[in-house]
Image: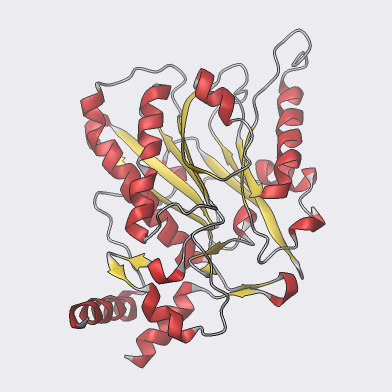
């Protein structure tokens, strides 16, 4: 117990001195976000209105028409307690045909329709003389902070997220992350990136973090949730449920099989934070390449990319926790910000 307390004290000392956590195991991109992969952009639409605390996040890959020039894509379902749309055909064909939209569980139909309309606007014969499109929309349940029955997410919000996509984007309690909880604290959108010199490539990760039990929270390898819990006696606990969506992008010319292998490594990053992919958590990772024509390297050459996927996932969740502002919402429910809790603990020291 003494050794654990010493670890916690050192972590809080670093927080006091640098106001940062996380020690990347390899070099990051210039922004340390998903947008370090050239051409990848992110946009949000956020609704913060009393008991309605929700939104939409769009991940827009490069290319004007993904339906006619799809990108290689693979997905890994770590725990399937989830209601996404689009994963079945990605598993079968290994391509991404639309941008990716994220929101709350009951908004998936709206996201699907938005992506269909967007594809039709670029392909007049879609579903007529041309095949139909496979939209990719993923979700987490934000019903603790958001009145999810209000069905507040609209097509206009999803369209705004697509239209506002940029290489510079906000993280934390924004977009799809507005109503999300993580380890009984405020979760949301986080991002990180790693440079892979041996492949002359970059890997970017974006997470929608809405998972984890507080007593399991591990920061920089230090079990820390147990130190936070006494500060929040009134806080309603969160089970390791609620879900996390992990989106990975790379400019390495991988094929769908290799991208699925990379996506699986998100699970190692979640484990470092204390998650075990609980029964009620929909934990899904999707990885795509920005290179339309795969030129897959030897599988053995993927080693640094696999390591980077785990590392960047861990740090993207940490980024979500440290970027998020506290939010109050549905029925007065509340989730505090991790950085405020760390400040309280650091002041006590």
Seen as rendered, the residue at the extreme bottom is 348
Seen as rendered, the residue at the extreme top is 129
Task: Return the residue nearer the eye: 212 or 285.
Answer: 212
Q: Position of residue 158 (x, y in %)?
A: 72, 44
Residue 260 lies left or right of residue 25; in this view the side is: right
Residue 45 in view = no
- Figure check: 266 above or below 95: below
Rendered-image quadrant of the N terminus? bottom left
Residue pictured at 72% horizontal, 10% vertical = 130
Residue pictured at 44% horizontal, 80% vertical = 229
Task: Return the residue nearer the eye: 182 or 202.
Answer: 182
Residue pictured at 34% horizontal, 43% vertical = 309
Q: Position of residue 147 (x, y in %)?
A: 75, 62
Residue pictured at 76% horizontal, 34% vertical = 113
Residue 103 in view = yes
Residue 111 lies left or right of residue 240; in this view the side is: right
Rendered-image quadrant of the C terminus? bottom left
């Amino acid at each position: 117990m003494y050794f654990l307390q010493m670890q916690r004290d050192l972590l809080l000392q670093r927080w006091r001195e640098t106001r940062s956590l996380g020690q990347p195991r390899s070099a990051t991109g210039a922004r340390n976000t998903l947008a370090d992969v050239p051409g990848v952009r992110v946009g949000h639409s956020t609704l913060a209105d009393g008991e309605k605390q929700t939104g939409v996040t769009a991940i827009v890959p490069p290319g004007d028409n993904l339906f006619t020039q799809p990108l290689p894509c693979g997905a890994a379902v770590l725990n399937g307690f989830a209601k996404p749309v689009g994963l079945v055909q990605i598993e079968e064909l290994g391509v991404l045909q639309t941008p990716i939209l994220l929101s709350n569980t009951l908004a998936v139909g709206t996201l699907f329709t938005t992506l269909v309309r967007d594809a039709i606007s670029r392909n007049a014969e879609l579903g007529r003389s041309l095949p139909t499109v496979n939209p990719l929309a993923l979700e987490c349940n934000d019903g603790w902070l958001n009145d999810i029955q209000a069905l507040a997410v609209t097509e206009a919000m999803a369209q705004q997220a697509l239209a506002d996509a940029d290489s510079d984007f906000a993280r934390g309690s924004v977009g799809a992350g507005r109503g999300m909880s993580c380890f009984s604290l405020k979760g949301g959108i986080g991002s990180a990136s790693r440079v892979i010199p041996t492949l002359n490539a970059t890997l970017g990760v974006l997470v929608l973090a809405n998972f984890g039990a507080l007593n399991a929270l591990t920061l920089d390898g230090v079990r820390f949730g147990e130190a936070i819990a006494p500060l929040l006696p009134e806080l309603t606990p969160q089970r390791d449920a609620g879900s996390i969506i992990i989106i990975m992008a790379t400019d390495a010319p991988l094929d769908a099989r290799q991208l699925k292998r990379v996506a699986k490594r998100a699970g190692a990053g979640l484990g470092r934070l204390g998650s075990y992919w609980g029964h009620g958590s929909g934990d899904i990772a999707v990885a795509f390449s920005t290179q339309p024509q795969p030129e897959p390297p030897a599988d053995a050459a993927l080693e640094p990319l696999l390591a980077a996927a785990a590392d960047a996932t861990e740090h993207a969740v940490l980024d979500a926790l440290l970027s998020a502002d506290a939010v109050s919402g549905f029925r007065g429910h509340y989730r505090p910000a991790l950085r405020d809790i760390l400040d309280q603990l650091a002041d006590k020291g």
